Image: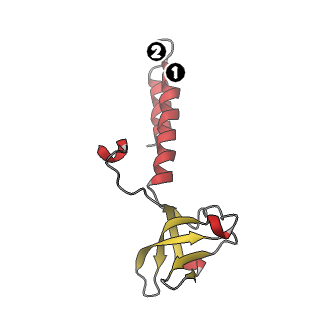
Amino acid sequence: MSDQEICEKLRKWIPFAAPGLDTLLEIAAQRLESLQRERKEHHDWTPCAEVMPEDSPDFQSMSRYECTILIPDGTREVFTLQRTGNGKWLYETGKGLDTVHGDQVVAWRKMSYPYNHDRKEDAE
């Protein structure tokens, strides 16, 4: 059951609740939605079949992503790739950049942050 569905059930179960409860439930639902969106942005994988990341406008500003790659033997591995302005995925070979076939990239997510003991989220 989604958070939104829970809020709707609460509204039905408490039809004569104190004034302001509906507003409080709405605020709670919005906050939960915001937290879910933030979690998705920073932690969850996004299947390429659903949506691709925005293309970088130029070579200098290519964004880096953690990507799940489907290897020809059927296994999946995680690589750091860059997304170009023309929709190509690139990886560092040690001798330069090389292209990954788009159909091999099955999911992506934003790069995670390196651990930093001064960051509140890392300290918890």
Q: Above or below — where is 8 with respect to 34?
A: above
Residue type highlighted by circle 1? Asp
Q: Residue furthest left?
A: 124
Q: Secondary structure at mark 1?
A: helix
Mark 1 burial class by Cα count in 10 Å: few <14, some 14-19, many 20+: some
**How far from the left and from the top, in percent, is residue 91?**
52, 77
Q: Residue at coordinates 49% horizontally, 22% vertically from top-left?
A: 24
Q: How many marks?
A: 2
- The spot of residue 26 in percent (x, y) is 53, 27
Vertical position of residue 37 compared to residue 16: above or below = below
Determine the secondary structure under disc 2.
loop
What is the x, y in percent for residue 11? 49, 25
The residue located at (66%, 64%) in the rendering is: 56
Query: In the image, 107: left or right of 119?
Result: right
Q: What separation in Å lies between label 1 and label 2 (alpha carbons)? A: 8 Å
Look at the numbered discs 1 and 2 and tell me whether their residues touch, using CB distance below 8 Å. yes
Side of 96 where 61 appears, left or right = right
Q: Name the residue beneath numbered marker 1.
A: 22
| Badge number at residue 17 | 2
